[in-house]
């Protein structure tokens, strides 16, 4: 008996194929075998007709099929082979057009397309599965996800399956400001009296959101773990760009760790008051500040990377990049609602440990910003074990007499910094920039300066890396960043650090020889 002729295979989906052949005279059934790639053939089934549907395949995989005919105890040889490659899986898209008013779960087998300003309302919890992608619709003006006071978001991604908020445009076309961003409003304490209308709200299609009046710095707004926000920052109104991540009055009961902002139009991470703690965060190419804290923020941040390679190019009509971007910009209180001016309570007293703040290369046009850390308007806090490099105007700027008063009152501590490739450690005294009157020795301000930064890290290029290139912020052998850390906390530093922030022998966000905690779930794409 001859083997079947005319064998063909057709991919019906990413996981299903159909095999067809010509009938063989006297055959009563057919044996179908399959091989993956160059592997061995194995029996996958029989058919009494001249077609067979095979399922359970892997997307984007090559398969080979062959068929033999049977009649009683007689079996033919196998046919010539037919080959296919399954296509990529097509994930269904679910459009999100209305506010979330009851407990809702978004699953990883769907893509969620935000079309408009979506609010998780008081009393509702939005749960997002690991590996889920959420897209802001490029064709809808004004797209953001707001988690309002009294609501919760539970977004637990993993290092291998991060949760990604991104643009609906195709890779290579995406730009900063393609959509709004992720905004969380908690019941934490703010040092400004209200009403305080959150920037980007009270605009067409988006009602005003008042984030003042919080009473509980231990409030819990949920969990963000292994979450990326990409190409955000759209401005619903002139000069009102949204941030990639906005945390307004978010309390310390909330868990934020392993977060990345990628190519946002405004700040990457902005904190208005509250006391949420954050660990293992990355900002890559921001249109404004990488980390911005103000209005009584009292939380703690450890292991933070900011890396700027370029001037962000915004989507047309989405808004404007900032004229004064910094690595860190921290304020006390400023403007309406500051009942005691820059001394309004509670003071802004964050703790930032093990930051690696890398400014743009010299080939990027400088602006009025380009300062590694801007501390002003009466801000205090503890800043320790960090690396500030490649900021073309200064490593650090201290502004306003009330900021200096925080040093005198021991509410502003700067310890164990490495500052490289900046023309000066501190910005010169001029106007409100008052560092010139600070006695570094008496204030126990401890810094080390070096002339070059390119040898600090293993694989952080001086030019812009290729789209999506993996970077390595681990200190190179012999790097000054590998040592010099404050490796034991005492007094106020130990009290503020608690069990959340640990002392390190190194400076910056990565331990020499330690885990590369940012790899696997981050993205370093430009568009």
Image: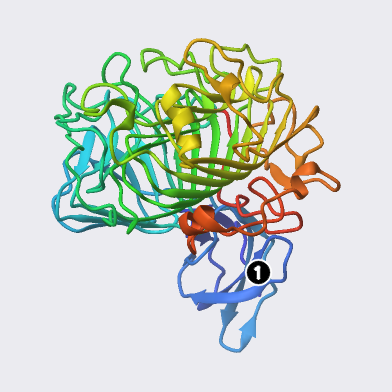
Front in this rendered view, residue 95 or 147 = 147
Q: Which residue is label 1 attached to? A: 3
Q: Is residue 355 above or below residue 393?
A: below
Identify the colour scheme used.
Answer: rainbow
Displayed quadrant of residue 229: top left
Decide if residue 267 is in sight here.
no
Front in this rendered view, residue 208 or 490 = 490
> How many numbered marks appear?
1
Q: Could you tell me which residue is drawn at 54 percent across and 17 percent down?
A: 369
Query: Could you tell me residue 401's position as x and y percent?
Result: 44, 23
Query: Could you tell me residue 204's position as x and y percent?
Result: 17, 21
Image quarter in which the C terminus is found: top right
Front in this rendered view, residue 240 or 343 = 343
Q: Could you tell me which residue is drawn at 17 percent across and 48 percent down?
A: 100
Decide if residue 273 is in sight here.
yes
Q: Is residue 298 above or below residue 378?
A: below
Q: From the viewer's perspective, is 293 left or right of 219?
A: right
The crowd level at tag 1 (other Cα within 10 Å; few <14, some 14-19, many 20+) is many
Q: Could you tell me which residue is drawn at 44 percent across and 21 percent down?
A: 400
Query: Could you tell me residue 283's position as x and y percent?
Result: 53, 37
Image quarter in which the N terminus is found: bottom right
Residue positioned most to the right = 478
Q: Secondary structure at mark 1?
A: loop
Q: Could you tell me which residue is drawn at 33 percent across and 15 percent down?
A: 239
Query: Could you tell me residue 364's position as x and y percent?
Result: 65, 15
């Amino acid at each position: 008996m001859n083997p079947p002729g005319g064998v063909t295979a057709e991919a019906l989906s990413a996981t299903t194929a159909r095999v067809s052949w010509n009938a063989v005279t006297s055959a009563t059934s057919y044996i179908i075998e399959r091989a993956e790639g160059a592997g061995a053939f194995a029996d996958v089934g029989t058919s009494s007709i001249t077609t067979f549907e095979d399922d359970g395949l892997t997307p984007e995989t090559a398969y080979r099929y062959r068929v033999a005919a049977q009649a009683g105890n007689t079996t033919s040889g196998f046919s010539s082979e037919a080959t296919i490659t399954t296509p990529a899986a097509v994930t269904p898209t679910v459009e999100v057009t209305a506010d979330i008013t009851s407990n809702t779960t978004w699953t990883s087998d769907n893509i969620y397309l935000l079309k408009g300003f979506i609010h998780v309302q008081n009393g509702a919890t939005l749960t997002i599965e690991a590996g889920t992608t959420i897209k802001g619709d490029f064709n809808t003006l004004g797209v953001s996800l707001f988690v309002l006071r009294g609501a919760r978001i539970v977004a637990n991604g993993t290092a291998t399956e991060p949760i990604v908020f991104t643009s609906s445009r195709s890779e290579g076309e995406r730009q900063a400001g393609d959509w709004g961003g992720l905004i969380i409003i908690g019941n934490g304490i703010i040092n400004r009296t209200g009403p305080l209308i959150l920037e980007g709200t009270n605009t067409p299609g988006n009602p005003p959101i008042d984030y003042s009046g919080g009473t509980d710095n231990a409030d819990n707004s949920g969990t963000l773990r292994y979450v990326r926000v990409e190409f955000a920052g759209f401005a619903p109104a002139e000069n009102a760009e949204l941030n990639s991540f906005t945390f307004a009055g978010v309390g310390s009961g909330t868990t934020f760790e392993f977060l990345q902002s990628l190519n946002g139009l405004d700040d990457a991470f902005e904190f208005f008051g509250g006391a949420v703690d954050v660990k293992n965060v990355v900002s890559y190419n921001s249109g404004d500040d990488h980390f911005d804290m103000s209005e009584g923020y009292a939380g703690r941040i450890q292991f933070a990377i900011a890396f700027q390679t370029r001037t962000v190019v915004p989507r047309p009509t989405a808004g404007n990049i900032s004229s004064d971007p910094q690595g860190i910009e921290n304020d006390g209180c400023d403007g309406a609602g500051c009942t005691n001016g820059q001394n309004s309570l509670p003071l802004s007293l964050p703790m930032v440990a093990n930051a690696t703040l890398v400014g743009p290369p010299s080939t990027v046009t400088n602006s009025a910003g380009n300062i590694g850390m801007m501390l002003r308007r009466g801000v205090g806090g503890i800043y320790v074990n960090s690396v500030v490099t490649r900021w073309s105007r200064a490593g650090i700027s201290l502004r306003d007499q009330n900021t200096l008063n925080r040093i005198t009152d021991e509410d502003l501590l700067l310890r164990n910094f490495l500052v490289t490739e900046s023309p000066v450690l501190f910005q010169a005294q001029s106007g409100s920039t008052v560092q010139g009157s600070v006695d570094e020795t008496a204030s126990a301000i401890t810094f080390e300066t070096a002339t070059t930064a390119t040898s600090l890290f293993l694989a952080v290029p001086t030019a812009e890396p290729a789209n999506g290139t993996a970077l390595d912020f681990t200190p190179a052998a012999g790097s000054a960043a590998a040592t010099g850390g404050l490796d034991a906390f005492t007094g106020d530093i130990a009290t503020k650090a608690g069990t959340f922030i640990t002392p390190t022998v190194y400076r910056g966000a990565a331990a020499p020889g330690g885990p590369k905690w940012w790899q696997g779930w981050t993205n370093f794409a430009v568009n």
